[in-house]
Image (cartoon, helix red, strand yellow):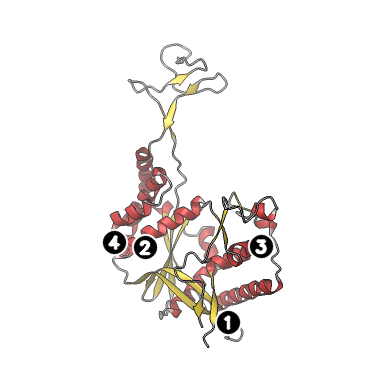
């Protein structure tokens, strides 16, 4: 009789490490917040664009499909600029890669690092961004500094996802020797306010009475605001096209600030450490399921300036049954197209 194994992904393990209660609500019960954060949405669209780019669909197609999912024209502009910059930065190198698969799902055994025994409860699962003959590539977006040697890159020596994907590549029949970590930094530039000007190109400053203000010597029109005196520089929102042009200039001037790649390898002892981490984490998940104990972690309620989606639920001021805030999903591993099971 074939036994069905429960798939556990890097995303799930990340949530479990962060907070057992969040893991319970998100992965065991399957509740997800309806409001999608900007970071998650942008990262998803970026992956869609790069998937098409690596498949050879062409830059225009990648841009059109990725930007179609933007929440507004400003986000679409950011995607267009970054995809054009990515193409300019890496197109010549892409031609040197032999792509085996793009967005390839895998199932790999979860092994006890001490005995080598395979788990009869869990299997590792995931999706590889780009698989080559002897290596693979992982795409990431971040708001952090990504210069080589920064803390962002130092942390990758401990990153469990890379180790999981080494196992995933082997499960797909490829003995990979390295991971190419492909990182894009999201620009911090936001749509700005553009000063209004008159027919002569002079900025317009008005008083609280709505009258145009002149300089102290009365020789010309004032062009700067002054809150104390009630002088307000008149502005308008920056148009999407203007924002896109400004972003293009910024990215073109500082490509290393926004695009970086680095090779990440895993030595044998590092893979063993990663196996131990994954094995113990899976055991803790199973123990919580059996005991019904899912402790909260108040230290994780606020992260990256955002409150956890389940904060109000844990504080008993909101309910998971509130359909305006939460929905229940059938497949808790939404990054995977297959069902949340794998045959042994």
Given the current orientation, which residue lies at the most extreme bottom position?
A: 1
Q: Nearer the viewer, mark 2 or mark 3?
A: 3
CA–CA distance in space, label 3 to label 1: 24 Å
Q: Earlier in the sequence, mark 2 or mark 3?
A: 3
| The disc label shown at residue 57, or none | 4
Q: Nearer the viewer, mark 3 or mark 4?
A: 3
Task: Give the image location of residue 103, x and y in percent.
Answer: 40, 68
Q: Residues within 10 Å of mark 4 (few under 14, many from 20)?
A: few
CA–CA distance in space, label 3 to label 4: 42 Å
Q: Earlier in the sequence, mark 4 or mark 2?
A: 2
CA–CA distance in space, label 2 to label 3: 34 Å
| The disc label shown at residue 119, or none | 1
> What residue does disc 3 label?
21
Task: Give the image location of residue 14, x and y in percent.
Answer: 58, 65
CA–CA distance in space, label 4 to label 2: 9 Å
**SS type, badge 4:** loop
Residue drawn at the location 29% of the way across and 54% of the way down: 60
Q: Quick one: 261 or 239, which is closer to the camera?
A: 239
Q: Earlier in the sequence, mark 3 or mark 1?
A: 3
Q: Earlier in the sequence, mark 2 or mark 1?
A: 2
Residue drawn at the location 55% of the way across and 18% of the way down: 229
Figure disc tally: 4
Residue drawn at the location 54% of the way across and 58% of the way down: 151
Task: Give the image location of residue 153, x and y in percent.
Answer: 50, 62
CA–CA distance in space, label 4 to label 1: 40 Å
| The disc label shown at residue 51, or none | 2
Confirm or deny contact between disc 2 and disc 3 (CB under 8 A).
Answer: no
């Amino acid at each position: 009789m074939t036994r069905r194994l429960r798939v556990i992904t890097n995303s799930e393990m990340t949530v479990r490490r962060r907070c057992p209660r969040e893991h319970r609500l998100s992965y065991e019960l399957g509740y997800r917040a309806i409001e999608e954060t900007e970071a998650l949405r942008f990262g998803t669209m970026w992956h869609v664009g790069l998937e098409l780019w690596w498949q050879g669909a062409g830059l225009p197609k990648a841009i059109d499909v990725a930007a179609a999912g933007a929440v507004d024209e400003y986000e679409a502009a950011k995607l267009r600029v970054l995809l054009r910059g990515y193409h300019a930065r890496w197109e010549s190198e892409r031609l040197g890669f032999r792509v085996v698969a793009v967005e390839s799902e895998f199932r790999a055994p979860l092994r006890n690092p001490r005995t080598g025994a395979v788990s009869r409860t869990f299997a590792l699962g995931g999706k590889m961004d780009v698989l080559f003959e002897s290596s693979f590539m992982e795409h990431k977006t971040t708001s952090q500094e990504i210069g080589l040697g920064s803390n962002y890159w130092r942390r990758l020596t401990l990153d469990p996802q890379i180790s999981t994907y080494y196992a995933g590549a082997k499960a797909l029949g490829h003995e990979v020797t390295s991971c190419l970590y492909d990182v894009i930094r999201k620009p911090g530039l936001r749509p700005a306010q553009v000063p209004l000007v008159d027919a002569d190109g002079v900025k317009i400053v008005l008083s609280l009475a709505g009258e145009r203000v002149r300089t102290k010597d009365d020789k010309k029109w004032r062009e700067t605001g002054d809150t104390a005196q009630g002088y307000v520089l008149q502005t308008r929102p920056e148009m999407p096209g203007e924002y896109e042009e400004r972003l293009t200039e910024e990215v073109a001037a500082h490509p290393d600030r926004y695009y970086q790649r680095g090779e990440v390898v895993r030595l044998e002892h590092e893979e063993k450490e990663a196996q131990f981490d994954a094995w113990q984490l899976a055991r803790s998940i199973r123990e919580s399921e059996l005991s019904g104990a899912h402790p909260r972690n108040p230290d994780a309620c606020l992260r990256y300036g955002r409150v956890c989606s389940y904060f109000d639920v844990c504080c008993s001021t909101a309910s998971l049954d509130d359909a305006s805030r939460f929905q229940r999903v059938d497949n808790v591993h939404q990054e995977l197209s297959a069902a949340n099971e794998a045959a042994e």
